[in-house]
Amino acid sequence: MGLDSYLQFISVLIIFILVLAATLYVTKWMANYQKGSNSSRNIEIIDTCKISTNKYIQIIRIGDKYLSIAVSNDLITNLGEVDPSELVQEQTGENLGFKEIFDKIKGEKKDNNGK
């Protein structure tokens, strides 16, 4: 009886791991598929600023023009054209993954707790 339950546990564990691996693969495939289908060379969101729970101001590029728009639940309003030379370009230089961001946050919490 003990060996049978042990084999049943191992088989359930293997099936669980296979389901997790399949979920990971399908999620990455869907992310790449949606990224490719949503990419446009003519329309790009440059910056977004949250004003309230469901209201945003965005700077977008459409072709060679830069526009500012206000976005809410049911309405998008054109606020006007923006001069590209007035925009501040943020240079981050690094693309951090989840692990790097998590380690950075852990380090900051340790610093704050130690003070």
Image (cartoon, helix red, strand yellow):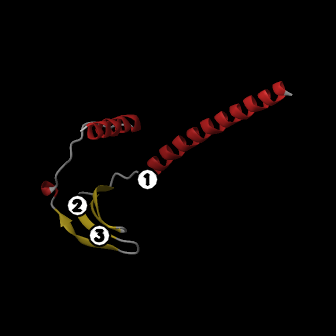
Residue 82 place in picture, x, y as percent: 18, 63
Q: In which quarter of the image is the N terminus?
A: top right
User: Marks 1/3: CA distance?
Assistant: 21 Å
Q: What residue type is labelled 3?
A: Ala
CA–CA distance between discs 2 and 3? 14 Å
Residue 62 showing in the rendered view: no
Q: Which of 21 and 107 is in front in this view?
A: 107
The kind of residue on which mark 2 rests is Tyr
- The residue positioned 73% from the left and 29% from the top of the image is 10
Label 2 – label 1 distance at C-alpha: 19 Å
| Residue under the point 40% across and 51% down | 39
Residue hosting label 3 = 70
Residue corresponding to mark 2: 66
Left or right of 31 in this view: 65: left
Mark toward the start of the polypeptide (1 vs 3): 1
Three-letter code for the amino acid on which mark 1 is drawn: Asn
